[in-house]
Amino acid sequence: MSGSDLEPNGSLPEEWRWTEEGWWSEVASKTKEQRGNSHQVNPSKANSMNLHSSVPVFLVLITLCGCIPENEIHGPISGAQAIEGIQVAADAYAQAFLAGDPDAIAGQMTEETVASPADLANIEGRENVRRFFQNVVQNMTVTAYEFEVVEAEIFGDVAYDRGNFRWVSSWQGQTPEESFGRYSAVRHRGPDGVWRIHRFIENVGPNPQ
């Protein structure tokens, strides 16, 4: 239909307006006329055709509009692709400890984070994380902190990952001690693209190797 098909008042021509049978009936009616009234169109069948033909169009439109996130249509990102992206975030978190920088550690957390370090009470909120580790780094030196992301799944801006870690640290004047463990994390991706820890829990255990 072009602009010349409109009525003088700008409205649609009568034959193009929505009817009780739906727009498909209109199309079917025009097709019947073009074929010289060679067949009849059953209105109930036309309605069924209208429903089924409209569904794919509807999905395409809402996808193009961004109404449904891409990952909800195609599923989560997992496997090596997800692990590679989350490993970068895990390494950045470890580097903050090696630098002894409580602000950098807290910067790897969301505002509503809940961290559950091994054998310690939960630490809730980014500011409380900063305060807690400010006291820790004043009395402890971390010489190694390594993460191995074993599994990760990304759903839009939320990621779930689990893996192993190795930690070497020493209190002032004491011999460094090495420990191993497992962790699980939920991360949220911020507007800056950084995957920050929203939930984190770890358990000390034997060397997974």
Image (spheres, rainbow, N blue to C red):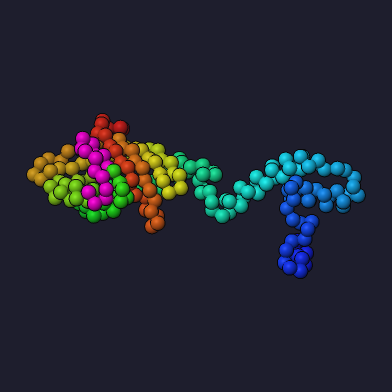
In the image, 207: left or right of 176?
right
The quadrant in which residue 208 appears is: top left
Picture coordinates of residue 105, whole percent (x, y): 25, 51
**Any part of residue 166 in sight:** no
Quadrant of the rendering where the C terminus is positioned: top left
Q: Which residues are magenta?
A: 115-128
Picture coordinates of residue 1, whole percent (x, y): 76, 61
In the image, 161: left or right of 173?
right
In the image, 127: left or right of 140?
right
Q: Is residue 122 magenta?
A: yes
- How many circles with numbers are drawn on the protein? 0
Please give the name of the residue rendered at 26% of the width and 30% of the height, measured from the top-left corner: 206
- Toward the viewer: 88 or 197? 197
Picture coordinates of residue 143, whole percent (x, y): 20, 46
Picture coordinates of residue 12, whole percent (x, y): 74, 61
The quadrant in which residue 17 appears is: bottom right
- Toward the viewer: 83 or 183? 183
Please give the name of the residue rendered at 43% of the width and 49% of the height, measured from the top-left corner: 157
Q: Is residue 109 magenta?
A: no
Residue at the top extreme, as displayed: 206
- Toward the viewer: 38 or 189? 38
Residue at the left extreme, as displayed: 173
